[in-house]
Image (tube, rainbow, N blue to C red):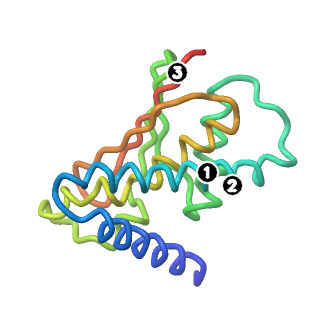
């Protein structure tokens, strides 16, 4: 329980720091990009550690199942609530109570700040998949707090 609180505190402090360094309305995209690249590097390191003793994955669905079950559980202490795919390289991961958004009010006035709180996690997933040899684009959307959806588009090489 204490490590979860520490992770949430560290995450919010990183957002606050990056936001203060990249202050201004036009720098909001740069703030999100910097947070995403931080998450990318962390995701690369974590997936290396988590897959050390794991057998090889057969296909990209196995990669995504690992991300939704084992990886997500290790980082956020719960599994993804829903995984959907169109079997053409697009996966939607739904978390109905995303921990990094649970500290924000569930009102509509904070929806504009959600991308900053989701950028690190988008990078985390993209970095993990990258280190597994899967090139992807990860985006996130929030319609009602604290639920969010991460869309993973696998890019064929």
Give how far across and how far down residue 150 sits, in percent: 41, 42
Q: Check the image and report above or below for 74 versus 8.
A: above
Classify the position of the C terminus by image quarter: top right
Real-space Cα separation, disc 3 to disc 2, in angstroms: 22 Å
Say which of 153 and 40 sits in front: 40
Which class describes the residues within 10 Å of circle 1: few (<14), some (14-19), or many (20+)? many
User: Residue at (83%, 43%) from the top-left corner?
Assistant: 54
First of labels 1, 3 by sequence position: 1
User: Residue at (59%, 44%) from the top-left corner?
Assistant: 127
Classify the position of the N terminus by image quarter: bottom right
- Left or right? Give the position of 141 relative to 126: left
First of labels 3, 2 by sequence position: 2
Mark 2, secondary structure of its residue: helix
Real-space Cα separation, disc 1 to disc 3, in angstroms: 18 Å
Say which of 118 and 145 sits in front: 118
Q: Are marks 2 and 1 in contact (CB under 8 Å)?
A: yes
Real-space Cα separation, disc 2 to disc 1, in angstroms: 5 Å
Which class describes the residues within 10 Å of circle 2: few (<14), some (14-19), or many (20+)? some
The residue indicated by pointer 1 is 43
- Left or right? Give the position of 108 relative to 41: left
Mark 1, secondary structure of its residue: helix
Give how far across and how far down residue 148 sits, in percent: 34, 50
The residue indicated by pointer 3 is 155
> Which image quadrant is residue 110 in?
bottom left
The residue indicated by pointer 2 is 46
- Left or right? Give the position of 48 relative to 115: right
Per the rendering, the mark at residue 58 is none
Give how far across and how far down residue 80 sits, in percent: 51, 49
Mark 3, secondary structure of its residue: loop
- Left or right? Give the position of 122 relative to 16: right
Q: Check the image and report above or below for 153 versus 117.
A: above
Give how far across and how far down residue 43 sits, in percent: 61, 51
């Amino acid at each position: 329980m204490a490590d979860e609180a520490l992770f949430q505190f560290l995450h919010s402090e990183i957002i606050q720091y990056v936001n203060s360094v990249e202050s201004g309305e036009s720098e909001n995209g740069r703030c999100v990009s910097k947070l995403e690249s931080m998450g990318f590097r962390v995701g690369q390191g974590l997936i290396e550690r988590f897959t050390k003793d794991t057998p090889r994955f057969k296909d990209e669905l196995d990669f995504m199942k690992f991300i939704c079950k084992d990886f997500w559980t290790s980082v956020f202490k719960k599994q993804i609530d829903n995984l959907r795919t169109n079997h053409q390289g697009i996966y939607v991961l739904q978390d109905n109570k995303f921990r990094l958004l649970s500290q924000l009010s569930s009102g509509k006035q904070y929806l504009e700040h959600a991308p900053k709180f989701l950028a690190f996690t988008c990078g985390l997933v993209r970095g993990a998949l990258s280190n597994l040899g899967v090139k992807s684009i990860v985006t996130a959307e929030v319609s009602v707090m604290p639920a969010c959806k991460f869309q993973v588009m696998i890019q064929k090489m």
